[in-house]
Image: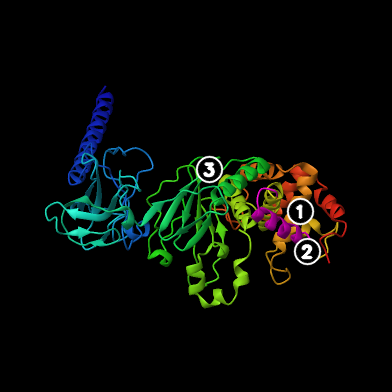
């Protein structure tokens, strides 16, 4: 009986001890949280890192911006989501934080607050506004509610250690003063638009972002539309396959550190830039899922062309046609990358060459420019692969993927790839690329181009080709070549 009493007393003691410890822990948590500000129903908790400027690109001049959707709604959280202190340590010193609150001009009820820590500059962001980009207003910056004469432009630093409320300031401008303008194209090749300002053209499937000093033919937009439709039909994907794609941002010295077109929301439409090389830096065209960027000397205005000596003295560089084959090549990259980036050099460049050839061939009778580029595409068929491809080495060349340029003729990934894709298209239909991309994505195969897996593993791609098209696909390729396209 005495032992039972001792046992019961021990249990009671343990339970009491647990309750006391829990109460102490709760008190400590409540004490620590007492200094943390919680966003109200109209404030958003914003994540702040030790280097906020990495996400905020300075701008030389500000233009109006738009929200990609309707006016955003702030989502309150239980507590602010700051994850890193300005010192880089894991501990967050909330008591030392100040709050910079941004209030939009057209919706004063919407507020967004950002934490600023003592003696750590906060870079003023390029605020997304509710005003349309083509409205008669220019965004000048943020002004201090308590001191309206103080203006903070995007990219500048806020260094004061105090809470502050900042509101948007806009300036009304005339049509002639606008930095960014919308243009229309007639559809007639003989008509031309000279861009004396940064310009925007909206097509059915794309937004065209045009630099200054370009000479754009009236059928340029229609021809891009035709190319995109042809590529979609041949490959089997659409450019809006996954909806919105994050657009490439031009925060470079080309445009004074800002993107002149940043205010335009292209939504699910393909972003296409045409850039003027004003100092003959030998810029080249390129593409990603986010945008296709073209440097097309044949579209430079007379004024720009004649202002650069190396252009004036080499007029042949201008060409006689618009290089729509280059546009088709780069847009193939954008289309395939929108679905999956993890493919090899050979399949990346080979498919772009192959589908550009199909597009130009299909459209060759549409205009003089397509006819001229068709002649060039046909001439490419006379190019050869630098090495002799046989039944014994065809798979090896594919798996090597021209990684070691010491033994590869630079450019053979284009030629080998184009010919290999021509073989696949002839034997298995033009949608072979769709089949390959779907399988590569399903397996998560990587390449140097892939953002999710940049492991260079073309051997796995070679194995996938055999899985999709037969163990003897590379033997059949060599037999199909039969010495063609080779020295």
- Which one is in front in this view, the residue at disc 3 or the one at disc 2? 3
Which mark is drawn over residue 188?
none
Viewer-closest of 297 and 164: 297
Helix or strand or loop: what does disc 1 sit on? Answer: helix
Which mark is drawn over residue 385?
2
Q: Position of residue 420 (x, y in %)?
A: 76, 53
Query: Which quadrant of the figure has residue 436?
Result: top right
Q: Spatial distance from mark 3 to mark 2, Cα to Cα? A: 36 Å
In the image, is residue 367 part of the stretch drawn in magenta?
Answer: yes
Write down the residue under mark 1: 420
Q: Spatial distance from mark 3 to mark 1, Cα to Cα? A: 30 Å
Q: Which residue lies most toward the top here?
A: 1
Quadrant the C terminus occupies: bottom right
**Residue located at (73% from left, 55% from top):** 418
Q: Position of residue 481 (x, y in %)?
A: 84, 55
Residues rendered magenta in the picture: 365-384
């Amino acid at each position: 009986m005495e032992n039972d009493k001792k046992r019961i007393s021990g249990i009671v003691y343990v339970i009491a001890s647990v309750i006391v410890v829990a109460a102490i822990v709760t008190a400590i948590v409540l004490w620590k949280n007492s200094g943390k500000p919680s966003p109200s129903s109209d404030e958003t908790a914003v994540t702040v890192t030790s280097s906020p400027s990495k996400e905020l690109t300075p701008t030389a001049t500000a233009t109006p911006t738009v929200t990609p959707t309707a006016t955003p709604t702030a989502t309150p959280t239980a507590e602010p989501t700051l994850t890193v202190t300005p010192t880089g340590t894991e501990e967050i010193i909330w008591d030392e934080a100040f709050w910079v609150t941004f209030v939009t001009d057209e919706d004063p009820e919407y507020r967004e607050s950002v934490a600023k820590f003592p003696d750590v500059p906060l870079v003023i962001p390029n605020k997304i506004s509710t005003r349309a980009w083509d409205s008669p207003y220019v965004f000048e910056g943020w002004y201090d509610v308590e001191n309206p004469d103080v203006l903070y432009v995007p990219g500048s630093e806020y260094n004061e250690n105090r809470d502050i409320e900042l509101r948007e300031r806009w300036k009304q401008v005339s049509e002639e003063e606008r930095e960014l303008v919308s243009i229309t194209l007639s559809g007639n090749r003989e008509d031309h638009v000279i861009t004396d300002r940064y310009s925007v053209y909206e097509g059915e499937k794309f937004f065209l972002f045009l630099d200054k000093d370009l000479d754009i033919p009236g059928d340029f937009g229609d021809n891009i539309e035709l190319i995109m439709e042809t590529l979609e039909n041949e490959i089997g994907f659409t450019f809006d396959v996954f909806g919105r794609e994050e657009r490439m941002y031009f925060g470079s010295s080309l445009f004074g550190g800002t993107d002149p077109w940043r205010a335009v929301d292209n939504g699910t439409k393909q972003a296409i830039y045409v850039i003027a090389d004003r100092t003959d830096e030998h810029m080249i065209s390129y593409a990603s899922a986010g945008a296709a960027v073209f440097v097309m000397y044949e579209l430079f205005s007379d004024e720009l062309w004649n202002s650069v000596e190396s252009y004036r003295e080499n007029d042949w560089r201008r060409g006689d046609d618009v290089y729509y084959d280059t546009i088709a090549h780069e847009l193939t990259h954008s289309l395939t990358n929108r679905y999956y980036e993890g493919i090899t050099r050979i399949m990346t460049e080979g498919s772009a060459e192959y589908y550009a050839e199909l597009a130009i061939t299909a459209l060759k009778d549409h205009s003089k420019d397509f006819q001229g580029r068709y002649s060039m595409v046909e001439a490419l068929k006379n190019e050869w692969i630098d090495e002799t491809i046989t039944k014994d080495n065809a798979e090896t060349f594919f798996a090597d993927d021209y990684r070691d340029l010491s033994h590869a003729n630079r450019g053979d990934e284009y030629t080998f790839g184009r010919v290999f894709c021509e073989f696949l298209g002839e034997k298995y239909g033009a949608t072979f690329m769709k089949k390959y991309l779907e399988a590569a994505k399903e397996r998560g195969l990587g390449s140097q181009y892939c953002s999710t897996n940049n492991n260079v593993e073309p051997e796995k791609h070679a194995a996938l080709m055999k899985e999709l098209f037969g163990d003897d696909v590379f033997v059949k390729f060599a037999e199909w070549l039969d010495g063609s396209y080779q020295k």
